[in-house]
Amino acid sequence: MADLIYLDYAATTPVDSRVLDVMRPYFADKFGNPSSVHRYGQVAEAAVDSARETLASVLNCRPDEIVFTSCGSEADNLALRGAALSMREKTGANWILTSRSEHHAVSKTAEQLEKYYGFQVEWLDVDEHGRVTPEAVKKALCDKTALVSVMYANNEIGTVNPIREIAALCRENGVLFHSDAVQAAVYLDVDVQTLGVDLLSLGAHKLYGPKGVGALYVRKGTPLIPHLTGGGQEFGLRAGTHNVPYLVGFAEALRLAKEEREARVSHLQPLRDHIIGRVLEEITDSKLTGHPAERLPNHASFVFKDVDGNLLLTLLDAAGFACSSGSACKTGNPEPSEVITSLGFSRDWALGSLRVTLGKDSTPGQVEAFLKVLPSLVEKTRRLT
Ligand SMILES: *Cc1c(COP(=O)(O)O)cnc(C)c1O
């Protein structure tokens, strides 16, 4: 992969070598089951406890408010299904309020709750920058609302939502509020007390931790029905023997993300702004997607008119650059992304989307090399489209 420049850190990130180092002993030497009574078990249990304490300290919550899961998607599933079912049982409320720009882990779960479980979903429109406004939430809230779910930062267009204000509105109305922070946690503050959320989803592989591990913050007293039943792990909310090395790695990755956040942001934001400025200046019929200011510091995303986005990605790959047209899950899908469409772009624009996401080790040289080839590749794609 030495001849490829990776510009797709919103899809996933490499495991930091410091993270790998702390994970390694737990695969073989310290392989015990945390539920075992003997010392193998005790060592593993201590590692899980310590990982939980690290997450709690970054999130500013209690350790027993952290539920480890197998990924960010699972955290979203547990939050939506668990809270919706439990709120309906408690109060009879059966409406779920969510936005048109959520990750599929939220939107498909909401759709399933509607189709098979008798809930009603209200989809909040986003503004032209992909933001869910507190006003829209306020208008839609009613005494039937069981749960509101609005993501912290969008993976496709980088937009950061005003979740603090939305959380405050939900609290005033006695409604649970969940936010998907899987994409946000590496660059934004995830102090759950200042955010005021009841449920917050995290995933390790977007923040230089391993794939296949995540967590859900569950504020004390939040009613939640477990979605994986079995042993009593994770306070009875999520059964399954702990993946000890991955939990250890997740905690170290999140700890480093907080410790290095300011440095990473000040490194990446000027590079991001340079990409946005040059692309809009040098490429005709190009537009930024997402919010110009309220966006993730590593995230640049565009639409180009009359461009086949997938073809552009293929040409970029051949030229040595790994980018994305939106969510990684959508690659190969000729339909325009629902998130881009929700911004109001017509099909001739929406099909030509490009997402360029930087990582902590991205360099100005890589960015320059990319900017040098992009305009001609867009033109080439236009000729071939
Ligand atoms: C990546 C991502 C997810 C899914 O996380 P996984 O750990 O890959 O399951 C959910 N929401 C957002 C916003 C994401 O970026």
Image (cartoon, rainbow, N blue to C red):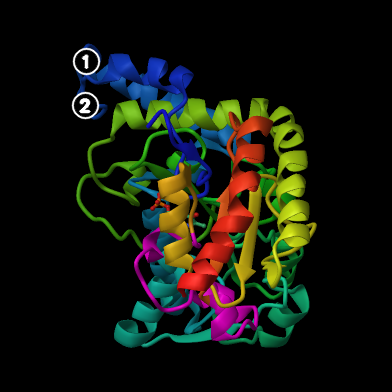
Asked if labels 2 and 1 touch by Cβ distance under 8 angstroms, the answer is yes
Residue range corresponding to the magenta coloring: 325-350
Q: Nearer the viewer, residue 26 or 348?
A: 348
Question: SS for tag 2?
Answer: loop
Q: Is residue 254 above or below residue 47?
A: below
Mark 1: which secondary structure?
helix
Q: Which comes before the other along the chain, label 1 or label 2?
A: 2
Q: Position of residue 355 (x, y in %)?
A: 56, 57
Front residue of this view, candidates 63 and 167: 167
Amino acid type at mark 2? Asn
Q: Position of residue 276 (x, y in %)?
A: 73, 54
Q: Specify the label residue 40 is tagged with.
A: 1
Q: Name the mark on residue 204.
A: none
Residue at 37%, 32% in the rendered image: 1
Q: Amino acid at mark 1?
A: Tyr
Residue at the spot x=34%, y=78% of the render? 112
Residue 25 image-quadrant placement: top left
- Count of marks, rendered view: 2
- For disc 2, the marked residue is 33
Residue 38 magenta-highlighted: no
